[in-house]
Amino acid sequence: MNSAFDHPSLVVRDEVRDALEGARPVVSLETTIVVHGLPHPQNLEVAAQCEAAVRAAGAVPATIGVLDGRVVVGLTIDELDALAEPTRDSTKLSARDLGLAVGLVRDGATTVAGTIAVAHRVGIDVMATGGLGGVHRDAAYTFDESNDLTTLSRTPVLVVASGVKSILDVGATLERLDTLGVPVVGYRTVRFPGFYRADSGFRLDWSVGSAAEAAAAFAAHRHFSPTGWLLANPVGAEDELDGDLHDAALANALAHAAATGATGKAVTPVLLAEFARFSAGASVTTNRALVVANAALAGEVSVALAALRR
Ligand code: PSU
Ligand code: MN
């Protein structure tokens, strides 16, 4: 039916294909958080919990990654396990890397940017992650700004995230999203979430009170703009990282990254891993809770969008 499904390097698994062809709800999930963002074995547990949360909301999960040069939409847990196996040395794939991973027959985990590029290609309009990438704190001289922002500005996919990672310059990231024309919408809040913390200290212009409101506004947005959306869902109060622990872990992680001289793709994984080490796993517990909650909300929004199509 859809010729996009028939490319030899693009494998859309039957359940996902059937749902898309039937205009039923599908939520895409990324793999960088699994392969490069969370420690083993929690990473696979989180992936399974995210898929279960999407299903509980009534949508089909489509976890996306590149295995042996094939872009798979709907990875199984066994395939995810293989992708996350350290000896496999899976590459972190942003949007610009996809063609190279396919052409050079590599394995790779997709970032938000890589995931939404594939999702849009096959007709999936909702995605869930933990925290969007953004403008790094030293961007004024490193120019380190996640491709998540530019790809979201030209890819009409609604991304549910708990704001942007608190390791970033949150204010600069919000300004960049404004410049790029990407709506940032609080879910039942006008405070921009702070990833491990519910409130980053920044106020938002817009919020929605339900998945149905989010779906209605995103559907309308797509008539007027080619960009995606950031639906910002704060971590629950019971799962937040303690404020003082957060600030101490952040200062330590930033100093560690500077001392190790991490650059490029390595920066975010190094910061997250050091955050986890310093907080004795507390940041991982928070990260798990928020990404699963985001998958659940993405499922609800996807169901509401599918209802609008009918
Ligand atoms: N959210 C998390 N953990 C992660 C990420 C998001 O809770 O590891 C990943 C996403 O794949 C996102 C990437 O696209 O971090 C950003 O990486 P960079 O800063 O290198 O663009
Ligand atoms: Mn970067």
Image: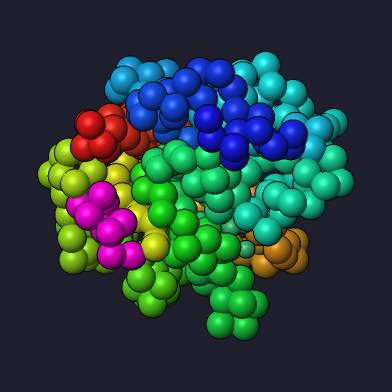
* 60 in magenta: no
Residue 55's place in the image compared with 283, above or below, is above
Indicate left or right for 290 with 61 as reference.
left
| Point 63% across, 55% down: residue | 95
Is residue 10 or residue 294 the one in the foreground? Answer: 10
Classified by dominant secondary structure, the portion drawn in magenta counts as: helix
Is residue 298 or residue 269 the one in the foreground? Answer: 298
* Residue 81 horizontal/vertical position (percent): 69, 22
Q: Image quarter for residue 35?
A: top right
Indicate left or right for 17 with 104 as reference.
left
Indicate left or right for 89 with 154 as reference.
right
For the question of whether residue 200 can be seen, the reply is yes
| Point 59% across, 22% down: residue | 13
* Residue 308 horizontal/vertical position (percent): 21, 37
Instruction: Give the farthest residue toward the bottom.
Output: 141
* Chain part drawn in magenta: 217-225
